[in-house]
Image: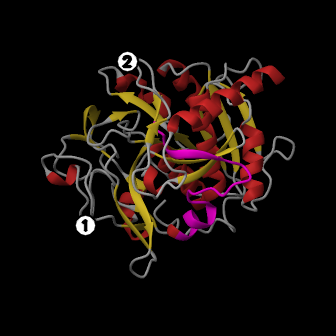
């Protein structure tokens, strides 16, 4: 076990060294690198991006922490979330997940979330503890991002981490069903791939009434990925989030990498009324995803600044958990009838498209940010 952990740490250090750039994710000229590489059909990649160099645990993280996210989205994080479980579905194993989670929460003064106190649970794709999948340093960083975002947004929530054997779609879908079976109130999926003709048959894995399911819209700009296209979940786009401006004290615009557009296969849900897509439109809502305004993540004893819609999906899943309303959520429909609980994002673009709202921020609904970002929990 020690040699396995040591090997993973060496891989993490190699990843940190390879990323280059400044340790300040908001500085000009910062190097941005994808955490997961491109994949062939039938596999999923994680939608996370790292900005700049990692810094040691003793250093100061440059990304946004819990207090920032809670303030930006007016969240009742200190008083809500008890009794809720957020499920995280990812591929491969992160052997240091619980250790890194403990260090993140300790650094920010959050209550412990451990296996021993019943707050944290890690299982394989069928719900067991043995055998665990093989480790992967890129997906392990993704796992740390997801766990840290749940902690930041809903520190009173329990966390269920379900690790699939590989990043094959079929394995991840099995893990998805396990997360729902084990009682997660909200489930986040920070991964995806290209749409495919058989995806509507696979929608059953995301059709779990009583659980609010979220999926990242992707990091390649205008264009649609699956499972974000599924009509049974909330597709989460991305924003750039900066301090200052207006009465809110924060400003948001479309992040240029956020996925959006018209699904090629999914029928249009009754709760979507935009006219530019005859089928399902992506996204529904959004949260911070720009790695240049990224979040602080602790992985293998190092601080990373991370973005991508891999960050926004667990944020939104955790807001659903804070709202405590998952049993009443019908796929991604709830925010559409509760838009007063959202901050509208009206500027920015993720590409060129027609009609323009599918890739440009505007008043009301738009593709990259959907209906907007959380303003408290009443929209969820």
Residue in view at x 57 percent, y 19 percent = 166
Q: Quadrant of residue 7?
A: top right
CA–CA distance between discs 2 and 1? 36 Å
Residue 191 in picture, x, y percent from top left: 47, 34
- For disc 1, the neighbor class at 10 Å (few under 14, some 14 to 19, many from 20) is few
User: Of 60 and 167, which appears nearest the observer?
Assistant: 60
Residue 9 in picture, x, y percent from top left: 71, 30
In the image, 35: left or right of 245?
right
In the image, 194: left or right of 100?
left
User: Is residue 50 found inside the magenta-colored segment of the image?
Assistant: yes
| Residue ID for mark 2 | 41
User: Of 223 and 204, which appears nearest the observer?
Assistant: 223
The circle on residue 363 is 1
Q: Residue furthest left?
A: 354
Tag 1 or tag 2, which sits nearer the N-term?
Answer: 2
User: Is residue 186 found inside the magenta-colored segment of the image?
Assistant: no
Residue 65 in picture, x, y percent from top left: 61, 60
In this rendering, does residue 181 appear at all?
no
Total marks in image: 2
Residue 4 in picture, x, y percent from top left: 76, 21
Residue in view at x 44 percent, y 54 percent = 292
Q: Residue furthest bottom?
A: 247
Q: How is the image coloured?
A: secondary structure
In the image, 190: left or right of 336?
right
Q: Quadrant of residue 325?
A: bottom right
Secondary structure beneath label 1: loop
Write down the region rendered in magenta. 47-71
Residue in view at x 39 percent, y 38 percent = 228
Q: Quadrant of residue 201?
A: top left
Quadrant where the N terminus sits is top right
């Amino acid at each position: 076990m020690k040699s396995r952990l040591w090997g993973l740490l060496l891989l993490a250090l190699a990843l940190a060294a390879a990323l280059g750039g400044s340790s300040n994710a908001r500085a000009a000229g910062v190097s941005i690198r994808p955490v997961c590489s491109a994949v062939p059909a039938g596999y999923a990649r994680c939608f996370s991006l790292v900005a700049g160099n990692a810094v040691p645990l003793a250093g100061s993280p440059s990304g946004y922490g819990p207090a920032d996210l809670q303030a930006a989205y007016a969240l009742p994080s200190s008083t809500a979330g008890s009794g809720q479980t957020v499920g995280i579905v990812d591929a491969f194993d992160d052997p240091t997940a619980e250790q890194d989670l403990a260090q993140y929460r300790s650094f920010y003064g959050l209550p412990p979330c451990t296996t021993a106190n019943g707050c944290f649970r890690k299982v394989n794709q069928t719900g067991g503890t043995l055998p665990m999948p093989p480790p992967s340093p890129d997906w392990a960083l993704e796992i740390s991002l997801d766990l840290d975002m749940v902690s930041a947004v809903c520190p009173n929530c329990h966390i269920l981490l379900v690790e699939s054997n590989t990043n094959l779609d079929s394995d991840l879908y099995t893990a998805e069903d396990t997360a729902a079976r084990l009682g997660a109130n909200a489930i986040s999926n920070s991964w995806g791939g290209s749409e495919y003709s058989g995806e509507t048959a696979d929608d059953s894995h995301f059709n779990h009434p009583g659980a609010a399911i979220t999926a990242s819209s992707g990091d390649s700009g205008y264009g649609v990925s699956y499972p974000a296209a599924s009509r049974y979940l909330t597709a989460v786009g991305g924003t750039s989030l900066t301090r200052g401006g207006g009465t809110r004290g924060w400003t948001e615009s479309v992040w240029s990498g956020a996925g959006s557009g018209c699904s090629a296969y999914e029928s249009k849900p009754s709760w979507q009324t935009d006219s530019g897509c005859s089928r399902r439109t992506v996204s529904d809502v959004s949260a911070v995803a720009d790695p240049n305004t990224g979040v602080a993540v602790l992985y293998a004893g190092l601080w990373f600044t991370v973005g991508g819609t891999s960050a926004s999906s667990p944020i939104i899943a955790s807001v659903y958990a804070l709202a405590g309303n998952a049993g009443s959520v019908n796929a991604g429909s709830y925010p559409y009838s509760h838009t007063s609980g959202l901050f509208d994002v009206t500027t920015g673009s993720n590409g060129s498209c027609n009609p323009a709202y599918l890739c440009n921020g505007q008043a009301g609904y738009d593709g990259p940010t959907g209906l907007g970002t959380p303003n408290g929990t009443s929209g969820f």
